Structure formats: structure tokens, C-alpha cells
Image (tube, helix red, strand yellow):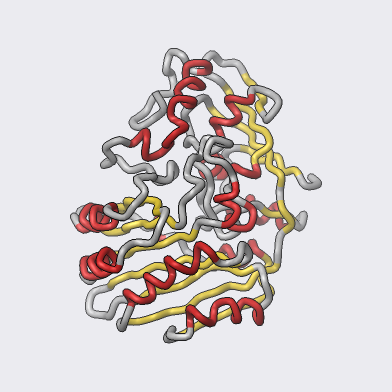
Amino acid sequence: MGEVATIGAGARLAEVYSTLHSYGRTLPAGCGPTVGIAGLTLGGGIGLLGRRYGLTCDRLIGVQVVLADGSVVDCAEDREPELFWALRGAGGGQFGVVTVLRFATVPEPLATRVEARWSGGALEDVVSAWQAWAPDAPDELTVNLSVASEPGVPMEATLFGASLLGEGPTRELLQPFVSSADSIELRAGLPFHRLKSTFADPRGVPAVRMRSEFFSHSMSAGTVSSLLAQLAKGGREIAFTAMGGAYNRVAEDATAFAHRGERFLLEHIGAVDDPWVDDSWATAHVDGSGRVYPNFPDPALGDWASAYHAGNCSRLVAVKDAYDPDRLFTFFQGVS
């Protein structure tokens, strides 16, 4: 295999990480073990190595695609370059059927698992401090934050993520932020594929609805206060994912993934029939960038094309015209 991995489109992340581990390699990708590598990559691919190595699609160096006319093409930077550009971040199913993906892998690091918790108390301060700190942390440190409520218990904030540094340097970096935490746990020396398996993905839970948005600057104190007040009823969660780092050192038009200037992603996760999901999204949207991760499709969006693709919209339509002129691959909120 060397440094290049050729992966079938049907592979899921658990088997991808396990197989790459046997070669001492890995990819910056997501946490959910059942997530498909193709769908993740075609929509971008955010994960715990991303602030160091970029999106999953940033490691993509070649793709085999079955086009609408039945022909099979291999595309890369120097072959069908416009199609290759579009396949890096516009979302799956847009231009053809992807069958094989080739990636430039990275050495699998030993990582330090990070988890800290705050219960009740001044969670507004925790959220505000995270927004100002986590997106600007060194690339080797990716720590995300969730705030969840359950019936009959105080709201709890959880900091979780990974450091590519040892326990001592990691603790030193974290100390200013976690000094007020009720608990902190660091587990050093974990091969990255083992660390990934320790984090459950809440989006795998049935009967859950989620909306999200990117943010290019911190939310105001008033917005944070309103979000937490709305969250108080049980069975709800808001989750912050740190961007910055290598994600943002790529031009917005270098790939189809246009969201290269964002500081964090915020998800609102609740029961499918809970109107809070829309209310919480609307509260945060006042401070949002209007950008939405293509891998988190949102049927409630108004100007969805701009939200998903921003300034790359017209170029994506041109690729669609060239490779699927009769619109065989058509679906709600697809490039048209």
C-alpha cells in the first residue's frame, strides 16, 4: 500500500481505520464506525485529525466514477480536473456513482484522549471560553464541546477530543480552560484508531433530528445565554466542533468545500418532534455565517445552495452541465 490507500466506496470507517492501522497509516476522518468513507469524503469530512491534516477530501488524490452515460472515468488533479474538484466537498450523489477512492494517507499517531466535564454552574462561561480558545488552539489539539440536558438532572458540558502530544504538554495546553472543570481525564499513548472507537456518535441514535450551521466568529453572550435557557428541558443537546487549523489554510475555491474561514460548527440535536430544534437553530442563526456542512443536509433551509456551496455554486452547476446534462442524478437540494 505504501502511503497511498485505494478504498472501495462501500467501506465503513471502522474497517478503514483498522486496515490502515495494520500499515501504520490513517486518514483524517470522522468518528462514527458505520459511516461510509465515500459519503464522508464527498461532502468534506470533519474529524479529530482535521485541524492537523485537513478535511478527508483534502487527502483525496483520485476517484473512479461511473457517469450518467455509463462510462467509467478516473479523475485526479491532472485527469478530468473539474470533476475531481467538484467531488471534493459538494456532497455525494451529485455527478455520478463513485466506486473507488484513492487517498494520500498520514502516519497513524499515538494520541492522548481528552475528556472533561462541568455540571450545572456557570456553563455560559464554559461555552464562551471554548469559542474563543478551541479554534485557535495548536493544530495538534482538537477539543470539541457538547452541552446536554436530561430530565431531572443539571445540564452538563463535556469537553472531548484528541491531542497529538503527550500527557504533560496536553495538560499544560488544557489547564487555562479546564481549571474550573468538575473532572478531567487524559489517556495518553493510544493508537489513533483505538482512540476513535472510544467516542460514540450521537447522530447514530434513532428518532433524533439535527440542524447545524457554521460560525465565523464567537456568538454574543446574549445568544449563548438564550441557547442554554432553551436547552434546559431534558433530551436536548448542542454540540460545538472546532474548525480552524489546516481546515482554514485552503482557499475556498480550491475544492468544492467552500467553508474555509469558519471557526466552529454548531449542531442542535433533539427528538424528531421537538420544536426546540428549530427554535434553538434560529436563536444561534443570528450570529451564524449562513454556511452549512454538506454532510449535514437540512431540509428546512431556505437558500440551501448558497448555504452548502457559497461562492462555488456556479462552478458546480457548470460541472453538472458537463457530466450529467440530462440530470439523471437528481435529488432534493442536489446541484441543479
Q: Is residue 285 above or below residue 142?
A: above
**Is 325 positioned to the left or the right of 248 in the image?**
left
Q: Is residue 225 above or below residue 10?
A: below
Q: Is residue 19 above or below residue 126?
A: above
- Residue at the spot 46% in from the left edge and 14% down from the top edge: 325
**Is 276 positioned to the left or the right of 47 in the image?**
left
Query: Is residue 310 visible in this depiction of the protein?
Result: yes
Residue 217: x and y in percent read: 40, 57
Residue 318: x and y in percent read: 48, 20
**Is 177 positioned to the left or the right of 226 in the image?**
right
**Is 38 positioned to the left or the right of 61 in the image?**
left
Q: Is the C terminus in the top left, top right, bottom left or bottom right quadrant?
A: top left
Residue 84: x and y in percent read: 60, 29
Q: Is the N terminus in the top left, top right, bottom left or bottom right quadrant?
A: top right
- Residue at the spot 55% in from the left edge and 32% down from the top edge: 87
- Residue at the spot 36% in from the left edge and 48% down from the top edge: 289
Kindly indicate the quadrant of the structure image that contains residue 228: bottom left
Front position in the image: 188 or 260: 260
- Residue at the spot 20% in from the left edge and 55% down from the top edge: 279
Total marks placed: 0
Residue 113: x and y in percent read: 58, 72
Query: Is residue 204 visible in this depiction of the protein?
Result: no
Front position in the image: 108 or 163: 163
